[in-house]
């Protein structure tokens, strides 16, 4: 699994809602079938880096529970394998206002 990093000053402070269309365009262009790699993306900001978390965002949200904070150590191929099952999102989901979700 390759992680594709996008660093663009124009994206500073962008919300998940603002980033979704850009990711969705990339996913449509690059998807070879379906899978969690094209259903979720990660955002990183200074606060998260200092506190060892990133934001895991649903690219095609089903509900208002569309992103959560995840520990950086939990982000990897194993998570994406688990997320291939749509129900796993709800097993791990934690409201970002309440803190960081853990696997």
Image: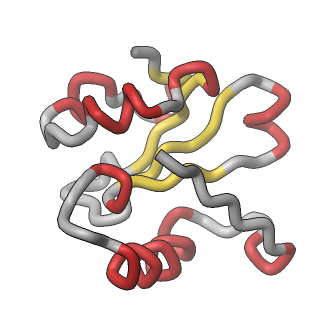
| Above or below 95: residue 56 | below
Between 36 and 71, the one lying in front of the other is 36
| Above or below 69: residue 15 | below
| Above or below 73: residue 67 | below
Where residue 38 appears, as percent x and y from the top left, is: 35, 61
Q: Residue at x 60, y 65 (%)?
A: 15
Where residue 96 appears, as percent x and y from the top left, is: 51, 35
Where residue 62 appears, as percent x and y from the top left, is: 19, 58
Asked where in the image residue 83 lies, by quadrant, the reply is top left
Colouring scheme, one of rainbow, by chain, secondary structure, one colour: secondary structure
Residue at far top of view: 103
Q: Residue at x 24, y 54 (%)?
A: 35
Task: Work out which quarter of the rendered image holds the C terminus and state it.
Answer: top left
Between 42 and 33, the one lying in front of the other is 33
Q: Residue at x 33, y 81 (%)?
A: 28
Question: Would residue 83 appear left or right of 100 to someone viewing this image?
Answer: left
Between 50 and 83, the one lying in front of the other is 83
Between 64 and 1, the one lying in front of the other is 1
Q: Residue at x 46, y 39 (%)?
A: 68
Question: Would residue 51 appear left or right of 28 to someone viewing this image?
Answer: right
| Above or below 4: residue 26 | below
Number of on-image labels: 0
Question: Would residue 72 appear left or right of 35 to someone viewing this image?
Answer: right
């Amino acid at each position: 699994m390759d992680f594709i990093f996008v660093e663009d000053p124009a994206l500073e402070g962008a919300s998940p809602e603002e980033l979704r269309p850009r990711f969705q365009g990339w996913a449509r262009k690059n998807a070879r079938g379906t899978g969690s790699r094209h259903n979720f993306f990660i955002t990183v900001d200074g606060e998260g880096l200092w506190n060892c978390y990133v934001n895991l965002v649903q690219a095609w949200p089903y509900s208002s529970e569309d992103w959560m904070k995840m520990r950086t150590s939990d982000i990897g191929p194993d998570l994406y394998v688990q997320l291939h099952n749509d129900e796993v999102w709800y097993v791990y989901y934690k409201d970002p206002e309440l803190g960081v979700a853990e696997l």
